[in-house]
């Protein structure tokens, strides 16, 4: 029988004794937080004297009363007590925090290195380096002498190399527990204690076992492991639209039509200071919309400890994933966020779990990612650095330290994956000689991580801003970055280089909804409604679902087709009456595949089911005129009653006159019918699908119409096509062009699309799209729909022309009423050089002349002086939209500037 007991220890000392008679116990083990023990004990019980003075209490568990185990995070400090001396029962209550609470009593000292704005820097440091600095320095001062740790600056407590570094600044006096919780909240690490040893691990590794799948699945079921299941949900944070406002005029609105909207659309705002590129804005917006798209539910599950199959601490711990009742009591993978066990005054032991579903866990990851972009890799409120007093003459700034590059994948509005980086570095507060210095800003450079590749300026930041973002970058490509400080036009030394590879998207699309099956004419039709399980819409990077089939008597799934959107495939040539199982998986453009959908089973129906034995009635068994029209009831002779070849020309009169109708098929169902109005066809529901009018010759058809069966042909409304279309098949039928109308691209509009076949190398197709407010001709990759060549497009307010490729730099021009925008690389030599030429008169400000170019460029332009001005004027500073000039002569008159600049 599962039970708990309490064992007392001297502070950092030996085992003292059991505490055998607690009146009540309540223990809480939260993930990445301080555990707690609440204890009631009477002063008249054995062991009460041990609680009169500071001690440690260990909580141990056992399933047989013989072998007892102290689990992680189960050592508590007897710090807080309360009681009433007049109470005859001698009742005393104790509240004990877990041993990790002791890190609150370790504070950070200034250290020997200079502080930055009163804060101590940790540049490109691991969680182990930061925590070891706190603890080791405290032990060196004589504090917490017996507190142990088993991680190092290079490896976590499991002996694994640290997978994250961070540049962070802490105020002296900050305690170690605050720093540790701060690191855990950023997803840098997980932590716990083992006895008196502090353990810190890479996030989501050692302290996250997936027990919801595999051979040792932990499934908590109603009545056996779970007694009650209250849920707490809220719609407070839901939104279907988000406005992102960044720097340099970046204003973008993103929407999520699939968001919960019981009262109509709700809006949200993100102020993204320091963000000026659209890729980063897209990541921020998509993260916010995903977190705000539906109700957030926290699940609490009361657990049974007597007779349960799975027991806390023994079979699962905080951080693990288990199968537990979710919505509607259906078992789903949930993460254990807290375990609470309690023994009442009657001695009954019970408990509860706080569980997070995959949506809440994803919320946590998305929130960490957003915080990392907005705040860079600097926590605790950022550096807050204030520059030292300005020096009278430009001096060379020191090289920045602590450069960190955090790459992320994101999906653009076309469903294509791209990369983004958030780059951060330490503040530069001195020149190369160590003298205090105020820098004017920083310049971030990057290049392909290849020997000899050229460096180019990515962006510039203002003084005090040590975080920059940049996108788009190519998935799977490696890039190198470096940064330098700028002081009054004097550039400093570069930092050390950091190289990263842009990761691919690893988020699998939703599990598809279950297949819908039907069988007719010996063929199985497998239909998908285009949604994920629970009516979840597919994401923008969805590619297709794979259709799988197996014989349940001889299991083994094989792929039988794919569906790019809602629709159906036909599976022919199946044995009659034999069950076949079908299921779906979904694939995105990055190759991530979902778990299988719920399966469905069906047996193919036989094409013909005759009423008589084979060959029991033949033409030789009938005398002449034995069967005539007046001897047959209406509908008595149908196709399935006539042997192949039984009715031929020599058995019919030269002219056969039909006075009523001739039917092939069911009289009221699927059939072809010849009657006095003409030739008509009906489907199984009795709906007319085709007709040829005897009076006018007009032809009407519902379904596929083909100009031929093989060879070069035109097919109208081909079977299985998701949209009505016309296909042009040149010969073999494998390389086809088509024209179709798509109503899903723009709400309430019919979009006409024309697609060519592929080229001989199968590397390109051409798609021409006509919509009411959109027109585009583009070269695409036929395998995934990516744009990879020239394009021309036009909308009501904008037109663009150029060249786009998923692995090379895009080159295009955009025209709108405000002017012309270019993205790409200008050729700097020859007659095709693109130059900015300005001539304008500018008055002097307080110390410099400011030239406003009237444009905001993706990178800071370079500038060339004319000969007469280069001897008088110095370039003071430049940004993406302004140039600042300094006049050494001290003159204040207005000056005329002739500016030549280029990207």
Image (spheres, grey):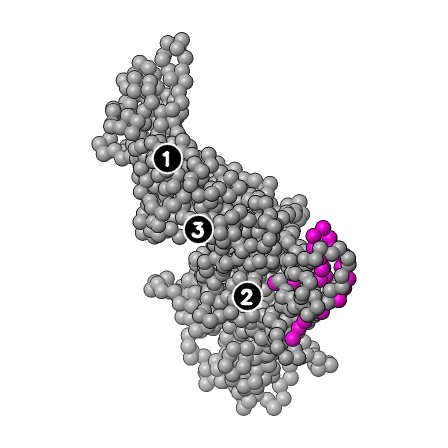
In the picture shown, does residue 168 fall above or below 67?
below
Q: Which residues are magenta?
A: 833-859
Task: Rate crowding at label 2 as few (under 14), some (14 to 19) or many (20 or more) other CA atoms within 10 Å.
Answer: few
What secondary structure is found at the residue carrying circle 1? helix
Residue 287 left/right relative to 551: right
Residue 823 picture location, percent across and down: 62, 68
Nearest the viewer among 144 and 711 is 144
Q: Say which residue label 3 marks.
A: 124
In the picture shown, does residue 521 fall above or below 304?
below
In the picture shown, does residue 75 fall above or below 322?
above
Give the residue at x 75% y 66%. Answer: 839
Give the residue at x 59% y 45%. Answer: 389
Res. 250 image quadrant:
bottom right
Mark 2 or mark 3: name the one nearer the start of the chain.
3
Residue 702 left/right relative to 528: right
CB under 8 Å between callouts 2 and 3?
Answer: no
Mark 1 or mark 2: name the one nearer the start of the chain.
1
Q: Say which residue label 2 marks.
A: 456
């Amino acid at each position: 029988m599962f039970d708990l007991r309490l064992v007392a220890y001297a502070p950092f000392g030996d085992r003292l004794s059991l505490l055998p008679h607690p009146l009540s116990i309540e223990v809480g083990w939260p993930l990445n937080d301080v555990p707690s023990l609440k204890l009631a004990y009477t002063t008249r019980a054995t062991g009460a004297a041990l609680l009169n003075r500071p001690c440690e209490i260990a909580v141990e568990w056992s399933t047989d009363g013989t072998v007892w185990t102290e689990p992680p995070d189960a050592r508590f400090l007897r710090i807080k007590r309360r009681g009433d001396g007049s109470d005859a029962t001698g009742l005393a209550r104790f509240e004990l925090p877990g041993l990790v609470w002791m890190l609150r009593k370790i504070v950070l000292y200034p250290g020997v290195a200079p502080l930055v704005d009163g804060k101590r820097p940790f540049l490109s440091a691991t969680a182990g380096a930061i925590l070891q600095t706190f603890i080791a320095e405290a032990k060196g001062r004589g504090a917490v002498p017996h507190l142990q740790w088993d991680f190092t600056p290079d490896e976590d407590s499991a002996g694994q190399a640290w997978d994250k570094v961070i540049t962070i600044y802490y105020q002296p006096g900050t305690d170690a527990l605050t720093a540790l919780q701060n690191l855990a909240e950023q997803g840098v690490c997980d932590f716990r204690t083992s006895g008196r040893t502090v353990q810190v691990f890479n996030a989501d590794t050692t302290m996250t076992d997936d027990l919801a799948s595999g051979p040792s699945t932990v499934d908590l079921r109603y009545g056996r492991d779970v007694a009650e299941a209250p849920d707490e949900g809220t719609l407070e944070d839901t939104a279907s639209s988000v406005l992102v406002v960044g720097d340099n005029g970046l204003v973008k609105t993103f929407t999520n039509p699939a968001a919960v909207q019981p009262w109509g659309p709700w809006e949200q705002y993100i102020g993204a200071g320091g963000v000026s590129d659209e890729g980063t804005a897209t990541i921020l917006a998509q993260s916010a919309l995903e977190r705000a798209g539906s109700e957030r539910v926290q699940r609490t599950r009361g657990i049974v400890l007597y007779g349960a199959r799975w027991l806390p601490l023994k079979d699962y711990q905080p951080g693990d994933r288990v199968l537990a009742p979710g919505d509607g009591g259906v078992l789903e993978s949930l993460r254990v966020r807290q375990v609470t066990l309690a023994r009442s005054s009657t001695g009954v032991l019970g408990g509860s779990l706080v569980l997070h579903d995959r949506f809440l866990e994803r919320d946590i990851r998305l929130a960490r990612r957003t915080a990392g972009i907005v705040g860079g890799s600097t926590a605790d409120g950022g550096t807050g650095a204030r520059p030292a007093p300005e020096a009278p003459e430009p001096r060379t700034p020191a090289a920045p330290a602590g450069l960190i590059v955090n790459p992320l994948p994101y999906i653009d509005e076309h469903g294509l994956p791209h990369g983004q980086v958030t780059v951060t570095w330490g503040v530069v507060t001195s020149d190369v000689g160590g003298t205090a210095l105020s820098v004017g800003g920083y310049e971030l450079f990057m290049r392909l991580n290849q020997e000899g590749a050229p460096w180019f300026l990515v962006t510039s930041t203002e003084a005090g801003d040590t975080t920059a973002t940049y996108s788009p970058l190519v998935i799977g490509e490696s890039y190198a970055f470096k940064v330098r400080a700028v002081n009054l036009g004097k550039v400093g030394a570069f930092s050390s280089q950091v190289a990263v590879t842009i990761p691919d998207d690893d988020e699998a699309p939703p599990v598809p909804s279950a297949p819908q099956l039907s069988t007719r004419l010996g063929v199985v039709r497998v239909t998908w409604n285009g949604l994920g399980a629970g009516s979840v819409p597919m994401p923008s990077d969805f590619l297709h679902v794979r259709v799988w089939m197996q014989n349940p008597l001889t299991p083994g799934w094989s792929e039988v087709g794919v569906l790019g959107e809602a629709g159906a495939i036909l599976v022919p040539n199946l044995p009659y009456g034999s069950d076949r199982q079908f299921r779906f998986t979904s694939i995105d453009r990055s190759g991530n595949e979902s778990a299988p959908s719920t399966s469905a089973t069906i047996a193919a129906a036989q094409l013909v089911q005759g009423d008589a034995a084979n060959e029991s009635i033949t033409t030789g068994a009938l005398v002449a005129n034995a069967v005539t029209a007046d001897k047959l009831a209406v509908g008595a002779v149908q196709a399935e009653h006539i042997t192949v070849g039984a009715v031929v020309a020599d058995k019919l009169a030269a002219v056969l006159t039909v006075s009523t109708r001739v039917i092939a098929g069911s009289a009221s169902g699927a059939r072809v019918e010849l009657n006095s109005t003409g030739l008509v066809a009906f489907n199984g529901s009795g709906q007319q699908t085709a007709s040829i009018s005897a009076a006018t010759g007009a032809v009407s058809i519902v379904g596929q119409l083909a100009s031929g069966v093989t060879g070069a042909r035109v097919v109208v409304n081909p079977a299985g096509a998701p949209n009505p279309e016309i296909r042009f098949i040149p010969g073999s039928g494998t390389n086809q062009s088509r024209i179709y109308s798509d109503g899903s691209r723009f709400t309430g509009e019919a979009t006409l699309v024309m697609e060519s076949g592929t080229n001989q190398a199968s590397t390109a197709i051409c798609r021409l799209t006509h919509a009411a407010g959109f027109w585009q001709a583009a070269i695409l990759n036929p395998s995934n729909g990516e744009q990879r060549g020239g394009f021309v497009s036009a909308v009501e307010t904008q037109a663009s022309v150029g060249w786009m490729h998923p692995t090379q730099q895009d080159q295009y021009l955009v025209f709108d009423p405000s002017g012309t925008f270019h993205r790409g690389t200008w050729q700097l030599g020859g007659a095709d050089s693109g130059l900015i030429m300005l001539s304008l008169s500018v008055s002097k400000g307080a110390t410099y002349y400011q030239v406003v170019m009237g444009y905001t460029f993706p990178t800071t332009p370079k500038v060339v002086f004319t000969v007469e001005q280069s001897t008088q004027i110095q370039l003071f500073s430049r940004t993406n939209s302004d140039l600042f000039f300094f006049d050494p002569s001290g003159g204040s008159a207005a000056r005329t500037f002739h500016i030549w600049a280029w990207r």
